Amino acid sequence: MTIVATALGLVLLFSFKTPDEIPAPGGPAAIAFGTPAPGATSPATPDVTSAGDDVNPTPAPPASSPPQATAASQQVDGDVIGTQFGDIQVRLIVSGSKIVDVQALQLPNDRRRSAQISQFSEPILHSEALQAQSAQIDTVSGATYTSEAYRESLQSALDRVHS
Amino acid sequence: MATSSTLSGSGGLSRRIRVEQIMGTAMSLDLRDRSIAPAAVDAAFDHLRDIDMRFSTWKTESEISRLGRGELSAEKCSPDVRVVLEQCERLRAVTHGFFDIRGHRPDGRLDPSGFVKGWAAESAAGILAAAGARNFCLNAGGDVIARGESEPGRPWRIGVRHPELPDRLATVIEARDVAVATSGGYERGDHIIDPHTGRPPSGLLSVTVVGPDLSEADAYATAAFAMGPGGLTWLDSLGGYDGCMITAERRLVWTPGFARFKADSDPSDIGRAMDLRARIAPCMRRNAPAVTECLRQR
């Protein structure tokens, strides 16, 4: 299904903020918004701040405070859409089946290719990081450790047989 | 030093674990088949130790060291060394120079040890398979070959280490018959250098590659790490290999093909995304000021 996205309209409308770290895992699936319809836009100059590096920020229009993401929220990122103001990626904050917030991220152009592939992404947070025990893993893949480092490593704990 | 232990459990589970310090790291074998002769396990570890001795960059009289000093030409090396050099040259081309056994050490020393570790592990796995082993997991210092299942009906679960928390995981891979290689700066402190710039890359904490052969997966993980975040696009373009990266912003990103290995992938997320897209469509056609409210109501 192709969806026509009014990219300029999106740029005008959304307040920018640093995306919240959302505790719930998963939610990596992307929604494709397709390409903006030519000519179907609001004419005013967009004021957007950038969530990425190397882009000159301009102040966003003030917005009412957005709904807070709850522990059950998920973050769903759409495709990167090219506009004359730069690349935009729309991020939805979804709680259950309801969209509670929409954010738009303006990206520097040189990140476009990696952003397009990175539709599959999630934060790895210290507070939520998986523990080996509860994850029931058999082995660990990591950067090569020395024999010395092995002794204190997670892998060595797994290699010990518990009777 | 080797340690070895056996656990026999109920329900047909047998687990033989053997760990040896080889190639400067720990090599762990977790063998689940009951009937494999200890001699086969010995042969696999003998092979790893043999390769270690012959390819060591630290032993001044090894072929690799002599080759590096120009005392030996490639043509005069033993067949195994020539195979390694040829494979590494092929991988240097495939990775656009980001995997380069000559380019990454500050002292310029020839160092195929990353490739050799995976290559030796693959042939050790072959020795076990030839002896009839179908279900085992060999962890060569953080690079893994998983064959078969950990128990009937249960694929191997391979944790990917969190780059900053040594006792935690970033994600879990679930698979049968797969090699998993991880590159990162966190164990040895930025020892991976971009051969094009001579400096460590920035932007990534680690890269994990999954595919059929561990020596290839290791080279691709090394190369993708050196490429930085854009390396994910390159990984996605490889046939038969997939991977994930952990960025400096502590985001896990992965290629679409990696999703089939990622243990906590939720297929219903895809369905939910499609539903959302259908619900959003009408909002995208409205006048701009109404869009947010329209979306929030859906």
Image (cartoon, grey):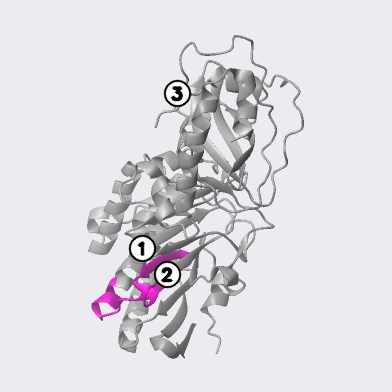
**Residue B75: quadrant of the picture:** bottom left
Quick one: label 2, few (<14), some, or many (20+) residues within 10 Å? many
Whether A74 is drawn above or below B196: the answer is: below
- Mark whose residue sits in front, 1 or 2: 2
Position of residue B208 measured from the top left corner of the image (x, y, whole percent): 47, 54
* Chain identifier of the residue bearing label 1 in the image: B
Within the magenta stretch, is there residue B133? yes
- Pointer 1 residue: B178
Instruction: Give the class, few, some or many, for how many residues have Cα within 10 Å of label 3's Cα (few <14, many ≥20).
Output: some
- Mark 2, chain letter? B
Q: Do labels 1 and 2 touch, CB within 8 Å?
A: yes
Residue at 54% x, 42% y is B201
Q: Which residue is mark 2?
A: B156
Q: Share a chain, discs 1 and 2?
A: yes
Q: Position of residue B273 (x, y in %)?
A: 49, 42
Residue that carries the numbered disc 3 in the rendered image: A35
Image position, residue B116 (x, y; %): 37, 61
Judged left or right of residue B291, residue B276 is left
Q: CA distance from mark 1 to mark 3?
A: 38 Å
Separation of disc 3 and disc 2 at Cα?
Answer: 41 Å
Circle 2: residue type: Trp
Which residues make up the magenta segment?
A: B126-153
Looking at the picture, does residue B195 appear above or below residue B66? above
The image shows residue B278 at horizontal and vertical percentages of 47, 35
Please state which of residues B2 and B68 is positioned toward the viewer in this rendering. Answer: B2
Q: CA distance from mark 1 to mark 2?
A: 9 Å
Q: Which residue occupies 63% across, 22% down?
A: B290
Q: Chain of mark 3?
A: A
